[in-house]
Image (spheres, rainbow, N blue to C red):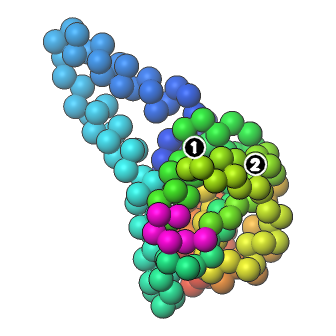
Amino acid sequence: MPFYPGPGLGGHCIPIDPFYLSWKTKQAGIEARFIELAGYINGQMPQFAADKVQNALNDAAKPVKGSRIHVMGVAYKRNIDDMRESPALDVMLLLLRRGAIVGYSDPHVPHLHLDGLQLDAQPESAAADADCVVIITDHAAFDYAALVDRAPLIVDTRNALKGYTSPKIVRL
């Protein structure tokens, strides 16, 4: 199964196991700089995704503060309900701290807790009311054609819209 760049790593093992391997190589007197660098870069991806959203809004003459941002998918990978280490949580938290009004749709995650907030999933149609839509988890259940038709601005962090061309689509 191929892996593509995205807004960060999620799940239980992928973010953790490489650092265990690095620790074990250090015990053997070997430095695993590449593993540590990859971990650092992966750890910075939520910040990079939030910056992409901010820049896309700036290009549309809108500040992040007060903008309605709708996240499509909060599970750590497509078509599951597992949110362990999901990059969506980090991206949403970064956008909230910048003053955004954040909502989400995820057919597999009806509720989530984020920094003391209780958020409930909204229907996909809520994305049409957002200033910016951010695709973080590319669930197969999402109607991407309708999303492209209705959303004013889309930041696609998973290449879910690879067959679509539109000036309102910003790719990670």
Horizontal and vertical percent position of residue 1: 61, 36
Classify residue 20 as left or right of residue 158: left
- Count neighbours of disc 1 (C-alpha within 10 A) and say few if under 14, some if 14 to 19, many if 20 or more: many
The type of residue carrying mark 2 is His
Q: Which of these two is toward me, 147 or 97?
A: 97
Horizontal and vertical percent position of residue 57: 50, 81
Query: Above or below — where is 55 with respect to 140?
Result: below
Q: Which of marks 2 and 1 is nearer the N terminus?
A: 1
Judging from the image, what secondary structure is the residue with disc 2 in? strand
Rendered residue at 45%/74% (across/down): 54
Q: Can residue 74 be seen in this view?
A: no
Q: Can residue 28 be seen in this view?
A: yes
Rendered residue at 22%/10% (across/down): 27
In magenta stretch: residue 123: no
Are the residues at dot 2 and dot 1 in contact (C-beta closer than 8 Å)?
no
Specify the label residue 118 is tagged with.
none
Judged from this view, the residue extending furthest toward the left is 29
Q: Give the range drawn in magenta.
A: 96-101
Query: Above or below — where is 72 with respect to 99?
Result: above
Rendered image quadrant of residue 154: bottom right
Horizontal and vertical percent position of residue 136: 60, 56
Q: Mark 2 points at which residue?
A: 111
Rendered residue at 19%/22% (across/down): 31
Specify the label residue 86 is tagged with.
1
Q: Which of these two is toward me, 172 or 50?
A: 50
Judging from the image, what secondary structure is the residue with disc 1 in? loop
